Image: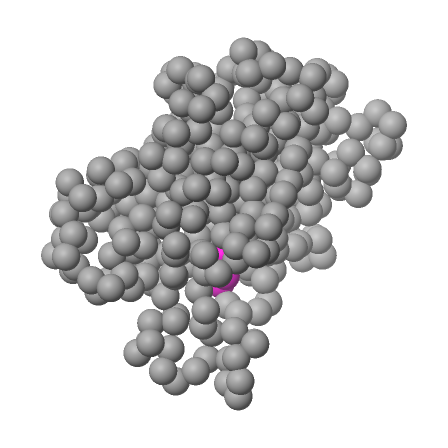
Amino acid sequence: MTADNAASRILGTGFYVPPRVVTNDDLSELMDTSDEWIRQRSGIEERRYSDPEDTPAAMAEKAARAAIQDAGLELSDIDTILVASLSPEHFFPGTACFLQDRLGLPGTACMDIRNQCTGLVYSLATADAFVRCGQSRHVLVVGTEVHSTGMDFSDAGRDVSVLFGDGAAAMVVGPSDDPSRGFLAHCLHADGSGARNLWVPSPGSSIFPFRAPPDMFEDRSVYPQMNGRAVFKYACTHVPAVILEALAKAGYELSDMDLLVPHQANMRINEMVGKQLGLPSSKVVHNIQRYGNTTAASIGIAFHEARQQGRIEEGSLVMLAAFGSGFTWGASLLRF
């Protein structure tokens, strides 16, 4: 395989979510919130929370094995592992190394990609490039997140904590025998000036004299902080634009697109994006109601479920689009 004739596509998908279901009513017992309040602002009805055995790498392994089986491959066929996560197994090394060990693939190249909610899109673009240039043949791409152990379940943290859930999703990217099937365009962007609008300040290596300050729980800097208004505005501006950019790059129109699989951050954002683009609801995937925001895993989970539901079939023109912390955003257009 050479860069002259290479094309890549998604060969298989899989996902895993923990069995523990946490409803909005469950959260209302921990903080001053309600089912109605959460639904109105986010569309979320429930999410999954991990038990101790469901670490990011453990969930990634389950999703990965399902995707590899779905692709009709063996574990030994995987030659590169990419893991997108904002909730790493440990501070270092990367979660991809822990996943590689769990899969029993010593010597296999592995790498973490830290682009938060846009992590899967960035990872798929990287996997596509690796296959096209001949660096890799079968790339395992995984998004995996455990948010539940890092949330502020006091009243002070309710605006953010109600949004997130745990889960993992995996895709296997490999060579396509049909040049018309596979990835058609990737558009990736970032604006670091918005980094502090959605972030976790502590711990961090920029903090002196210790990266984990002793008062980080008291001042709540260890918990996610979000400027919700800024995130909503940026997302509703940049996601429609990057979708149109990817379509134009590949020479397609909005009317050609069969399905949009957006990052599941907030139902209201996705509804606004669909409205701005004039897309009927039948062309936009929503599953945030059941899983909440699983950041790097969300697009993979939504994509796999759309396949299961028959909404993505062979030949479907599908757009993946995400916006998240960083700020980062991006879109990938593919013919499945």
Against 299, is 93 above or below? below
Q: Residue 129 colored magenta?
A: no
Q: How far from the left and from the top, in percent, is residue 79?
A: 70, 45
Q: Residue at x 22, y 44 (%)?
A: 38
| Residue 129 occupies quadrant | top right
Q: In this orientation, which residue lies closer to the viewer: 149 or 178?
A: 149
Against 256, is 247 above or below? below
Q: Residue at x 45, y 36 (%)?
A: 236
- The residues colored magenta run 85-89
Against 242, is 30 above or below? below
Q: In this orientation, which residue lies closer to the viewer: 63 or 88?
A: 88
Q: Residue at x 32, y 61 (%)?
A: 151
| Residue 100 occupies quadrant | bottom right
In this rendering, position of residue 224 left or right of residue 114: left
In this rendering, position of residue 25 left or right of residue 116: left
Q: How far from the left and from the top, in percent, is residue 63?
A: 47, 42
Q: Quadrant of the N terminus?
A: top right
Residue 122 showing in the rendered view: yes
Q: Could you tell me what secondary structure mostly forms the magenta stretch? A: loop
- Residue found at the very far top of the displayed protein: 255
Q: How far from the left and from the top, in percent, is residue 5?
A: 84, 25
Q: How far from the left and from the top, in percent, is residue 113?
A: 61, 53
Q: Quadrant of the C terminus?
A: top right
Query: Which colouring convention does the figure follow?
Result: one colour
Residue 72 showing in the rendered view: no
Q: In this orientation, which residue lies closer to the viewer: 274 or 114?
A: 274
In this rendering, position of residue 237 left or right of residue 180: left
Q: Residue at x 26, y 41 (%)?
A: 41
Against 51, is 275 above or below? above
